[in-house]
Image (spheres, helix red, strand yellow):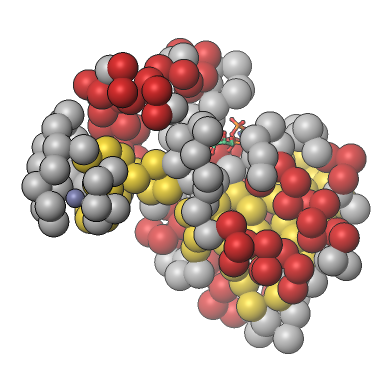
Amino acid sequence: MAKIVILTGAGISAESGLGTFRDKDGLWTRYDLNDVATPEGFARNPALVHEFYNARRKNCFESEPNPAHIALSRLENYYEGEVLIVTQNVDDLHERAGSRAVWHMHGELSRAKCADCDHRWSAPLEMTPGAPCPACNSSATRPDIVWFGEFPYHMDDIWDALRAADLFVSIGTSGNVFPAAAFVQDAARAGARTLELNLEPSMGSHDFAEARFGPASQLVPHWVDQVLGA
Ligand code: APR
Ligand code: ZN
């Protein structure tokens, strides 16, 4: 049966109020990513980093999935082939919309981890510097987020999935950050059809066989209706 691999970025959660990174009022226009999204920044000022992720965790907790997340869950439930979401997002809106096959390549706001023993657990709404690891009591605890300079999660499985994909769809990502920005080429090389659904052309739009522009909350339900023959 056909397999659809979907890459999502901050743009799919924008209409849920979570903001994006590189749009005009995006997170990286208000915070220096070197301070809040690198291991060096965390070593320098863990309190600032926890404050940044505590604010995003609260924002996520108070937000709701939007019609784009809900449409992808409907696709997974009714499409007779396989549907896999690989997300760069650290929010849980795909899961709260009902999607089950979701791989978070940049980690998850809802998870914490220990840098000493690699234990992972559900993060409290507010994390604080040096809170002890539930498994080894170390104070080397941090958000379970993949920072710049760190290797994303699930990469071997993601590359296998891209090689097996019949259709690769990219939703709400600017195509600025690798390795995700190269997934379209990996999929196309393996023979997959490629489709971009984004508010405006991304850095990689020219690599897609087809691109549609507009808000995800309109584009994605319409595309899912087409796939399901609704
Ligand atoms: N509908 C569809 N697309 C949208 C919408 C919307 N309502 N609003 C914004 N977009 C698009 C923007 O046009 C942009 O192309 O979403 C994209 C958001 O791009 P970024 O802010 O760069 O976010 P993203 O691509 O997910 O960033 C990738 O960079 O900082 C790291 O780890 C972080 O996972 C993040 C990665
Ligand atoms: Zn530990």
Q: Residue at x 39, y 42 (%)?
A: 145
x, y (%) of residue 118? 29, 53
Q: Is residue 95 above or below residue 211?
A: below
Residue 35 falls in image quadrant: top left
Front residue of 33/136: it is 136
Q: Residue at x 41, y 61 (%)?
A: 95
Judge by depth and name the residue closer to the eye, 53 or 227: 53
* Apparent side of residue 50 relative to residue 225 in the rendered image (left or right): left
Task: State which quarter of the image contains the C terminus.
Answer: bottom right
Q: Is residue 65 visible?
A: yes
Split into quadrants, the picture shows ligand 1 in the one at top right
Where residue 16 appears, x then y in whole percent?
Answer: 45, 40
- Residue 100 place in picture, x, y as percent: 45, 70
- Residue at the image position 46 percent from the left and 14 percent from the top: 32
Residue 27's spot in the image, x, y percent? 48, 22
Residue 89 visible in the picture? no
What is the residue that sits farthest to the front in this orientation?
Answer: 116
**Picture quarter with the N terminus:** bottom right
In terms of image quadrants, where is residue 143?
top left
Q: Indicate left or right for 223 with 210 as reference.
A: left
Of residues 57 and 211, the one nearer the viewer is 57
Tally of marks: 0
Which residue is located at x 78 percent, y 52 percent?
184
**Vertical comparison of 85 with 173: above or below:** below
